[in-house]
Image (cartoon, rainbow, N blue to C red):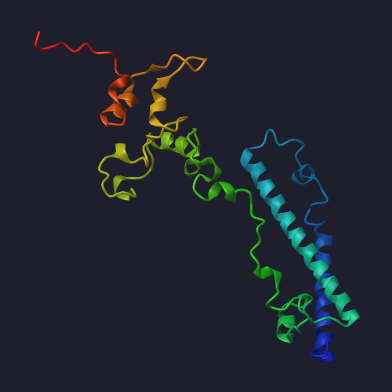
Amino acid sequence: MPHLTSQQLQSLSKRLMEMKSDYEQRLQQSDHYGLENSLRESTGELSPIDNHPGDVGTEMFERGKDIALNEHHETQLERIDTALKLIDKGTYGTCVVCGKEIPFERLDAIPETMFCVEHSPEQAVSNNRPVEEEFLYPPFGRTSLDENDQTGFDGEDAWQIVESWGNSNTPALHEENNIDSYDDLHIEASDELDGFVETYETFVATDITGRHVTIVRNHHYQQYMDEGEGEHLLEPDTVVEDLDH
Protein backbone atom coordinates (compact mmCIF):
# COMPACT_ATOMS: atom_id res chain seq x y z
CA MET A 1 0.00 0.00 0.00
CA PRO A 2 2.82 2.46 -0.76
CA HIS A 3 0.58 4.74 -2.80
CA LEU A 4 -1.84 5.21 0.13
CA THR A 5 -0.94 7.47 2.99
CA SER A 6 -1.58 6.33 6.54
CA GLN A 7 -4.36 8.89 6.81
CA GLN A 8 -6.05 7.61 3.66
CA LEU A 9 -5.72 4.00 4.79
CA GLN A 10 -7.11 4.82 8.21
CA SER A 11 -10.07 6.63 6.63
CA LEU A 12 -10.83 3.71 4.29
CA SER A 13 -10.52 1.17 7.10
CA LYS A 14 -12.93 3.17 9.25
CA ARG A 15 -15.47 3.37 6.42
CA LEU A 16 -15.21 -0.37 5.82
CA MET A 17 -15.90 -1.08 9.49
CA GLU A 18 -18.90 1.26 9.44
CA MET A 19 -20.24 -0.41 6.29
CA LYS A 20 -19.81 -3.85 7.84
CA SER A 21 -21.66 -2.81 10.98
CA ASP A 22 -24.47 -1.31 8.90
CA TYR A 23 -24.99 -4.42 6.76
CA GLU A 24 -24.85 -6.75 9.75
CA GLN A 25 -27.42 -4.61 11.56
CA ARG A 26 -29.75 -4.65 8.55
CA LEU A 27 -29.58 -8.42 8.22
CA GLN A 28 -30.06 -8.96 11.94
CA GLN A 29 -33.01 -6.59 12.34
CA SER A 30 -34.82 -7.95 9.30
CA ASP A 31 -34.09 -11.62 10.09
CA HIS A 32 -32.33 -11.78 6.73
CA TYR A 33 -35.30 -9.99 5.14
CA GLY A 34 -37.75 -12.47 6.56
CA LEU A 35 -36.10 -15.48 4.92
CA GLU A 36 -35.67 -17.17 8.27
CA ASN A 37 -39.45 -17.62 8.31
CA SER A 38 -41.43 -19.70 5.85
CA LEU A 39 -43.70 -18.02 3.34
CA ARG A 40 -46.70 -19.32 5.27
CA GLU A 41 -45.47 -17.67 8.46
CA SER A 42 -44.75 -14.37 6.73
CA THR A 43 -48.22 -14.20 5.17
CA GLY A 44 -50.10 -15.48 8.21
CA GLU A 45 -52.10 -17.88 6.05
CA LEU A 46 -52.29 -21.61 6.58
CA SER A 47 -53.12 -22.18 2.93
CA PRO A 48 -53.15 -19.95 -0.19
CA ILE A 49 -56.06 -21.86 -1.75
CA ASP A 50 -58.76 -19.42 -0.68
CA ASN A 51 -56.72 -16.36 -1.69
CA HIS A 52 -56.91 -14.47 -4.93
CA PRO A 53 -54.07 -15.49 -7.32
CA GLY A 54 -52.97 -11.85 -7.38
CA ASP A 55 -52.35 -11.93 -3.63
CA VAL A 56 -50.19 -15.02 -3.96
CA GLY A 57 -48.33 -13.37 -6.85
CA THR A 58 -47.64 -10.32 -4.70
CA GLU A 59 -46.23 -12.47 -1.92
CA MET A 60 -44.03 -14.34 -4.39
CA PHE A 61 -42.73 -11.06 -5.80
CA GLU A 62 -41.93 -9.75 -2.33
CA ARG A 63 -40.18 -13.01 -1.41
CA GLY A 64 -38.08 -12.80 -4.59
CA LYS A 65 -37.15 -9.20 -3.74
CA ASP A 66 -36.17 -10.24 -0.21
CA ILE A 67 -33.93 -12.98 -1.59
CA ALA A 68 -32.22 -10.54 -3.96
CA LEU A 69 -31.61 -7.97 -1.20
CA ASN A 70 -30.34 -10.61 1.18
CA GLU A 71 -27.91 -12.00 -1.42
CA HIS A 72 -26.69 -8.50 -2.26
CA HIS A 73 -25.98 -7.60 1.35
CA GLU A 74 -24.31 -10.92 2.11
CA THR A 75 -22.10 -10.48 -0.95
CA GLN A 76 -21.19 -6.97 0.17
CA LEU A 77 -20.30 -8.28 3.63
CA GLU A 78 -17.98 -10.87 2.08
CA ARG A 79 -16.25 -8.18 0.04
CA ILE A 80 -15.86 -5.91 3.05
CA ASP A 81 -14.41 -8.74 5.16
CA THR A 82 -11.97 -9.57 2.35
CA ALA A 83 -10.91 -5.91 2.06
CA LEU A 84 -10.29 -5.73 5.83
CA LYS A 85 -8.17 -8.89 5.66
CA LEU A 86 -6.15 -7.37 2.82
CA ILE A 87 -5.53 -4.30 4.96
CA ASP A 88 -4.16 -6.55 7.73
CA LYS A 89 -1.93 -8.31 5.19
CA GLY A 90 -0.71 -5.04 3.74
CA THR A 91 -1.90 -5.78 0.19
CA TYR A 92 -5.01 -3.62 0.19
CA GLY A 93 -5.27 -1.17 -2.70
CA THR A 94 -3.72 -3.34 -5.42
CA CYS A 95 -5.66 -5.20 -8.10
CA VAL A 96 -5.85 -8.92 -7.37
CA VAL A 97 -5.72 -9.66 -11.11
CA CYS A 98 -2.85 -7.56 -12.44
CA GLY A 99 -1.27 -6.22 -9.26
CA LYS A 100 -1.71 -2.63 -10.45
CA GLU A 101 -2.22 0.02 -7.79
CA ILE A 102 -5.84 1.10 -7.45
CA PRO A 103 -6.14 4.91 -7.31
CA PHE A 104 -7.35 6.40 -4.04
CA GLU A 105 -10.25 8.07 -5.86
CA ARG A 106 -11.61 4.64 -6.84
CA LEU A 107 -11.07 3.24 -3.35
CA ASP A 108 -12.79 6.28 -1.88
CA ALA A 109 -15.85 5.60 -4.07
CA ILE A 110 -15.81 1.80 -3.63
CA PRO A 111 -13.78 0.94 -0.49
CA GLU A 112 -14.49 -2.80 -0.78
CA THR A 113 -13.19 -3.13 -4.34
CA MET A 114 -10.27 -5.45 -5.08
CA PHE A 115 -10.01 -4.68 -8.79
CA CYS A 116 -8.76 -1.85 -10.96
CA VAL A 117 -11.10 -0.37 -13.54
CA GLU A 118 -9.75 -2.54 -16.36
CA HIS A 119 -10.35 -5.81 -14.50
CA SER A 120 -13.56 -4.98 -12.69
CA PRO A 121 -15.86 -8.03 -13.07
CA GLU A 122 -18.91 -5.76 -13.22
CA GLN A 123 -17.84 -4.73 -16.73
CA ALA A 124 -18.44 -8.22 -18.09
CA VAL A 125 -22.00 -8.92 -19.20
CA SER A 126 -23.30 -11.89 -17.29
CA ASN A 127 -24.68 -14.82 -19.26
CA ASN A 128 -26.86 -15.73 -16.31
CA ARG A 129 -30.10 -14.38 -17.73
CA PRO A 130 -33.69 -14.96 -16.54
CA VAL A 131 -35.30 -17.94 -18.20
CA GLU A 132 -38.21 -15.73 -19.27
CA GLU A 133 -35.98 -14.00 -21.82
CA GLU A 134 -35.85 -17.21 -23.85
CA PHE A 135 -39.56 -16.78 -24.46
CA LEU A 136 -39.77 -12.99 -24.69
CA TYR A 137 -37.02 -12.52 -27.28
CA PRO A 138 -37.24 -13.07 -30.16
CA PRO A 139 -41.04 -12.73 -30.49
CA PHE A 140 -42.76 -15.99 -29.52
CA GLY A 141 -39.37 -17.19 -28.22
CA ARG A 142 -38.82 -20.92 -28.38
CA THR A 143 -42.46 -21.49 -29.33
CA SER A 144 -41.88 -20.02 -32.81
CA LEU A 145 -39.81 -22.53 -34.72
CA ASP A 146 -40.63 -21.54 -38.30
CA GLU A 147 -37.09 -20.29 -38.87
CA ASN A 148 -35.76 -23.75 -38.02
CA ASP A 149 -37.70 -25.59 -40.74
CA GLN A 150 -40.41 -26.39 -38.25
CA THR A 151 -43.67 -27.46 -39.87
CA GLY A 152 -45.61 -28.39 -36.75
CA PHE A 153 -48.12 -26.25 -34.90
CA ASP A 154 -46.23 -23.72 -32.78
CA GLY A 155 -46.78 -20.52 -30.80
CA GLU A 156 -46.88 -18.30 -33.88
CA ASP A 157 -49.58 -20.46 -35.47
CA ALA A 158 -51.60 -20.25 -32.26
CA TRP A 159 -51.34 -16.45 -32.29
CA GLN A 160 -52.35 -16.27 -35.96
CA ILE A 161 -55.52 -18.23 -35.22
CA VAL A 162 -56.40 -16.03 -32.24
CA GLU A 163 -55.56 -12.83 -34.12
CA SER A 164 -57.76 -13.83 -37.05
CA TRP A 165 -60.74 -13.23 -34.77
CA GLY A 166 -59.70 -9.63 -34.31
CA ASN A 167 -57.48 -7.42 -32.20
CA SER A 168 -57.44 -3.87 -30.91
CA ASN A 169 -55.59 -2.47 -33.93
CA THR A 170 -57.15 -0.47 -36.74
CA PRO A 171 -56.22 -0.55 -40.46
CA ALA A 172 -54.43 2.77 -39.96
CA LEU A 173 -52.13 1.24 -37.35
CA HIS A 174 -51.26 -1.90 -39.29
CA GLU A 175 -47.64 -2.43 -40.26
CA GLU A 176 -48.62 -2.69 -43.91
CA ASN A 177 -50.12 0.35 -45.70
CA ASN A 178 -52.43 -1.50 -48.07
CA ILE A 179 -54.88 -2.75 -45.44
CA ASP A 180 -58.39 -1.38 -45.93
CA SER A 181 -60.51 -3.87 -44.04
CA TYR A 182 -60.66 -5.10 -40.48
CA ASP A 183 -60.86 -8.62 -41.91
CA ASP A 184 -57.29 -8.33 -43.20
CA LEU A 185 -55.66 -7.08 -40.01
CA HIS A 186 -54.13 -10.34 -38.89
CA ILE A 187 -50.47 -10.75 -39.73
CA GLU A 188 -49.33 -13.57 -41.95
CA ALA A 189 -52.63 -15.27 -42.53
CA SER A 190 -51.40 -18.78 -42.07
CA ASP A 191 -50.94 -20.49 -45.43
CA GLU A 192 -48.28 -22.69 -43.93
CA LEU A 193 -48.50 -26.44 -44.28
CA ASP A 194 -48.97 -27.75 -40.75
CA GLY A 195 -47.18 -31.06 -40.47
CA PHE A 196 -45.89 -31.08 -44.05
CA VAL A 197 -42.75 -29.96 -45.81
CA GLU A 198 -43.71 -30.18 -49.48
CA THR A 199 -47.09 -29.23 -50.89
CA TYR A 200 -47.64 -32.58 -52.59
CA GLU A 201 -47.58 -34.30 -49.19
CA THR A 202 -51.01 -32.77 -48.52
CA PHE A 203 -52.72 -34.78 -51.24
CA VAL A 204 -50.56 -37.89 -51.79
CA ALA A 205 -51.55 -40.74 -49.48
CA THR A 206 -50.62 -44.38 -48.96
CA ASP A 207 -51.94 -47.20 -46.87
CA ILE A 208 -50.31 -48.44 -43.67
CA THR A 209 -47.78 -50.49 -45.63
CA GLY A 210 -46.61 -47.49 -47.65
CA ARG A 211 -48.03 -48.91 -50.86
CA HIS A 212 -51.17 -48.31 -52.90
CA VAL A 213 -50.58 -44.64 -53.53
CA THR A 214 -53.75 -42.60 -53.87
CA ILE A 215 -54.38 -38.96 -54.70
CA VAL A 216 -56.71 -36.81 -52.61
CA ARG A 217 -57.88 -34.11 -54.96
CA ASN A 218 -58.28 -31.33 -52.42
CA HIS A 219 -57.72 -27.60 -52.88
CA HIS A 220 -53.99 -28.03 -52.32
CA TYR A 221 -53.95 -30.46 -55.23
CA GLN A 222 -55.88 -28.10 -57.48
CA GLN A 223 -53.58 -25.20 -56.56
CA TYR A 224 -50.53 -27.39 -57.13
CA MET A 225 -51.71 -28.30 -60.62
CA ASP A 226 -52.84 -24.76 -61.50
CA GLU A 227 -49.40 -23.43 -60.66
CA GLY A 228 -47.82 -25.89 -63.06
CA GLU A 229 -45.91 -27.69 -60.35
CA GLY A 230 -47.11 -31.16 -61.24
CA GLU A 231 -47.78 -33.33 -64.26
CA HIS A 232 -51.27 -34.41 -65.18
CA LEU A 233 -50.13 -38.00 -65.01
CA LEU A 234 -51.87 -38.01 -61.68
CA GLU A 235 -55.22 -37.27 -63.32
CA PRO A 236 -57.64 -40.14 -64.06
CA ASP A 237 -57.20 -41.88 -67.39
CA THR A 238 -58.99 -39.94 -70.10
CA VAL A 239 -60.30 -41.55 -73.29
CA VAL A 240 -59.19 -39.41 -76.23
CA GLU A 241 -61.56 -39.82 -79.15
CA ASP A 242 -60.13 -39.96 -82.61
CA LEU A 243 -61.80 -37.08 -84.40
CA ASP A 244 -61.06 -38.64 -87.80
CA HIS A 245 -63.35 -41.60 -87.14
Residue 38 drawn at (x, y percent): 80, 45
In the displayed structure, 30 sits above or below 7; it is above
Q: Which picture quadrant has residue 25?
A: bottom right
Of residues 46 and 238, which is closer to you in this image?
A: 238
Q: How many marks?
A: 0
Of residues 182 and 155, which is closer to you in this image?
A: 155
Residue placed at 83% from the left, 75% from the top?
Answer: 83
Residue reaching furthest to the right: 88
Residue reaching furthest to the top: 245
Residue 46 drawn at (x, y percent): 77, 36
Residue placed at 33% from the left, 48% from the top?
Answer: 174
Residue placed at 58% from the left, 51% from the top?
Answer: 133
Residue placed at 45% from the left, 36% from the top?
Answer: 157
Left or right: where does residue 40 sit relative to residue 169?
right
Of residues 6 and 35, which is closer to you in this image?
A: 6
Left or right: where does residue 58 sit relative to residue 163?
right
Of residues 36 and 238, which is closer to you in this image?
A: 238
Residue reaching furthest to the front: 244
In the displayed structure, 225 sits above or below 2; it is above
Q: Quadrant of the N terminus?
A: bottom right
